[in-house]
Image (tube, rainbow, N blue to C red):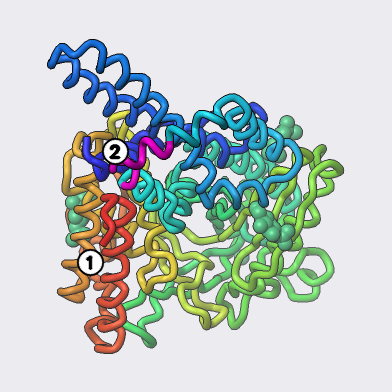
Amino acid sequence: MDPVMFLFVLLQRLIQYPPPVGDGLDEETHWRMEARAKYLEWEMLRLEQKVEQLSQKKMQHLQLLAVAVLLALVLVLWIIGWKSSPRRKENEEENHGANEEEVGNVAGNEDDSDGNDVVNEAAFAENNDNDVENVVQEDNNFDDHVGQDIMERIQWPAQDLQRGCGWVTDLMDNYTFYFAHVLLDSFYPVLHRAIGVGSAFEGWSPREQDVVYRVLIPMTPPRGHSFHLELDSARQRHVRNFRVRVQLECTCTGQQLGENMLCFLHNPEEELRSNQEPSLLDTLCTDSYLDVQKTARWFRQLVKAIWPAFPQSHNWHLTLLPSARSCQFNVTTNGEESFRIEMLFGVRRGDSAVFVSSQPREAYTLSTIWRESYAVAEAEFFKYIARQAPPDSLHLKCLQFFSCLVQGLSFSTYTMKTIVMHLLSAMPASSWRRGHLRERLTDIRDSLHICLQQKFLEHFIVGNRTFPQDINLPPDVKMGRTYNLFRHLAQRPAAHTQAMQDYRLLHKRFKRIALGEDN
Ligand SMILES: *[C@@H]1O[C@H](CO)[C@@H](O)[C@H](O)[C@H]1NC(C)=O
Ligand SMILES: *[C@@H]1O[C@H](CO)[C@@H](O)[C@H](O)[C@H]1NC(C)=O
Ligand SMILES: *[C@@H]1O[C@H](CO)[C@@H](O)[C@H](O)[C@H]1NC(C)=O
Ligand SMILES: [Zn+2]
């Protein structure tokens, strides 16, 4: 096995077998120990091969000697690697208390038992086997900062992410229950069960501390009201913005709801004012359009007001985070575990998987503008893929890998997600099995390159006539004009130049980390 192959296999194994957590050692230490163990395992294999060659020459005496020397060499390499590893030092500085003890013990024992022999053997080894240099060099590559960072991010076990999603779903269900009670007699929008969207719920959020659990809460009109989505075509033609017009409906005849609600249209105003809560038009609307910011403010008040009703509220801690168009907060549980949650809200387009939602894509968006959102359709697409995927499918790890790799470059994670979604639907599920990792990573990189050269990356959903039938899209989304995510590259040469420069950087990082080549 050549060194490049080795690094690659290591990458695969780390992806495949995330280290167990929770038995006292931190993940970093676990990972490092496992990496070291794999490294030695490989080194032993290599040495065994050499030994085999020697034994073929039937030089039994020499063979024994060689085994002894080579075994010593393994120890030398272990210790040289261990001591010179910058990661080790970093780690010791970073880790305090229990972790530091663990690390200290492992290194300490080695020094005690083998310290003296090592020096002599090292001199011998360096003279006689220039492999040492290669190996140390390899070790340096291996310690490469970016590579390490990425490995840390993608090794996070998928089970933790799933558990987090489950917990957040529970919390949201608890909220839904209270929303229904609190809003029962009001004329605020009816809030439905939250739908998990975004990288966490799709299964590829790269790192524990960065995870934002994002949910979309569908809203429907309250009694005596109706919603009408109006495409706002006046501004930019390529983005699909909507406004939600709120209309009052006559309730004179339809008293089927049982309670004596006054009709907003036909009862005298004084009677309405003194006997009935105000209509939605008077609370969350601006010029009879549902206002995103007013809705967000109302939402935050609601979330905060309901919190103390939860039995866990005195042990757990809720922190609302500033946000004009959504409701973001942190919940810290008694175990110091922290979840960052973003609640978006939206109105479903018909019975489709497309919503108009409060999430803006640009910094400045009018408060009555609701952007068409494909987040639910995309999350459904990932579920659809998961149903077909073999258990060892690595498509999510590929996406994690690239979402880390593009950090600091001008490519968004949404760009990478779009490319992966295109590839996922173009290839059979079996081509994402563990053994094809290297090819798939290369495919993703090459797709990005081609799209950049052509300044063209098709939106995965808008204008896609062959989108899976299981996922319901409104006809105008399905049959509409396709949307080029790279249109800014076609329009602005400077942006294209920058993107090509960034691609070269990405290519370099990719070679070093995914293929283990040094330039
Ligand atoms: C949801 O409510 C149930 C019942 O009160 C409770 O046992 C559970 O811990 C709650 N879950 C979350 C995440 O709030
Ligand atoms: C929210 O939690 C994240 C970790 O989940 C943490 O990094 C962040 O500082 C927290 N923010 C606040 C305002 O507590
Ligand atoms: C449309 O969706 C299909 C099926 O998921 C996929 O194969 C194809 O790449 C998509 N096409 C476009 C133009 O986005
Ligand atoms: Zn009426």
Residues at marks 2 and 1 touching, judged by CB atoms closer than 8 Å? no
The residue carrying mark 1 has its beta carbon less than 8 Å from ligand 3: yes
Q: Quadrant of ligand 3?
A: bottom left
The residue closer to the viewer here, 498 or 377, is: 498
Near mark 1 (Cα within 10 A), the count class, few <14, some 14-19 or many ≥20, is many
Q: Amino acid at mark 1?
A: Glu
Mark 2 falls on what kind of element? loop
Q: Quadrant of residue 496?
A: bottom left
Q: Position of residue 241 (x, y in %)?
A: 41, 75
Q: What's the residue at 17%, 74% (across, down)?
A: 453
Q: What's the residue at 65%, 70% (across, down)?
A: 323
Residue wearing tag 1 = 458
Near mark 2 (Cα within 10 A), the count class, few <14, some 14-19 or many ≥20, is few
Q: Nearer the viewer, mark 2 or mark 1?
A: 2
Q: Position of residue 321 (x, y in %)?
A: 70, 64
Q: Is residue 411 visible?
A: yes
Give the answer, above or below, for where 432 lies relative to 338: above
Q: Quadrant of the N terminus?
A: top left
Q: Quadrant of the C terminus?
A: bottom left
Residue wearing tag 2 = 129
Mark 1 falls on what kind of element? loop
Q: Amino acid at mark 2?
A: Asp
User: Which residues are the magenta region?
Assistant: 122-133
Q: Position of residue 426 (x, y in %)?
A: 17, 48
Q: Residue furthest left?
A: 57
Give the answer, above or below, for where 9 lies relative to 350: above
